[in-house]
Amino acid sequence: MIRLDREHEARKADPFLLRQQVQRLIPDPSLVVYAWQVPSGVAVLAASPAKAASILQHSEAIAARFGNATVERQETWTTFVVGPIPKKVNTLDGAYDPLEGLLLEEPAIRAIKDDTPIRHIAWTRRSTDSLSPFGHIRIHVPEARAHKVPSLMQLFGQATSVQRVSNKQLLRTCNKYFGFCCNETVLHQYRCRISVCALLHVTLNSLVTRFHL
């Protein structure tokens, strides 16, 4: 992964040209299978993890060629929601948004940063839209280091909850019987193959009974 600024010229380049540029910077051009633009910059595809490691050995040369870029292995990141914390913190110099630097000075956050990188810290959308003086923040850490984040933090003198956001996929549901909106017995040939929905359908030969939930 080549991380670039939003206005970087490489974001507008042809993917074929991007691949050629990277190939010229490494001894074995066959290591690079493809390159294309992604929201964070340019993704470089290698044929195997071993070949990806070989490309990373030339990360400094690639970063220098693109300019103002960071070359790193793409990781899976885990999101945590921390809060509630005050949206304004009173200091001797006045009231400030904790995300303007005060939060990073808290010992609990510093302890995490000393042990694992934090990619992004921001208010949740609900906190931004809410008029409440308190809100929640999102922090992103590498999934491999997520176990280092505690379930409770001491922030601005208060015990603050930390909840991990799970990336569970939505359960598939049967479109025909979604909602179970009324009590009735209908004649229907049972064809539902969705396991979750099958547990809800009560069948007797060709009869399907729908229950109101």
Image (spheres, helix red, strand yellow):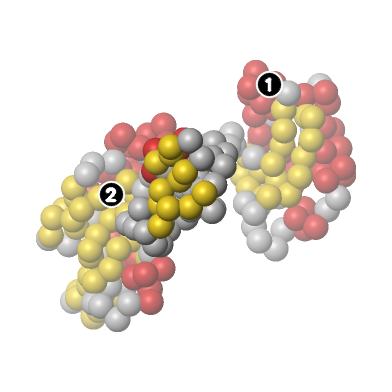
Residue 107, compared with residue 183, is above or below; it is above
x 41%, y 68%: residue: 125
* Three-letter code, disc 1: Ser
Residue 79 visible in this rendered orientation of the protein: no
Q: Are marks 1 and 2 in contact (CB under 8 Å)?
A: no
Q: Is residue 182 left or right of residue 76?
A: left
Q: Position of residue 137 (x, y in %)?
A: 33, 61
- Look at discs 1 and 2 and give the one toward the viewer: 2
Residue extending farthest top: 50
Q: Position of residue 111 (x, y in %)?
A: 26, 43
* Three-letter code, disc 2: Gln
The circle drawn on residue 17 is: none
Estimate how packed mark 1 is, as few (under 14), some (14 to 19) or many (20 or more) residues with alpha carbons within 10 Å: few
Residue 179, compared with residue 207, is above or below; it is below
Q: Position of residue 142 (x, y in %)?
A: 44, 39
Residue at the disc numbered 2: 163
Q: Position of residue 26 (x, y in %)?
A: 78, 27
Front residue of 57 and 98: 98
Q: Quadrant of the C terminus?
A: bottom left
Q: Is residue 17 left or right of residue 183?
A: right
Residue 185, compared with residue 76, is above or below; it is below
Q: Tell me how far mark 1 sits from mark 2, CA to CA.
A: 35 Å
Residue 162 visible in this rendered orientation of the protein: yes
Residue at the disc numbered 1: 48
Estimate how packed mark 2 is, as few (under 14), some (14 to 19) or many (20 or more) residues with alpha carbons within 10 Å: some
Residue 156, compared with residue 16, is above or below; it is below
x 57%, y 42%: residue: 189
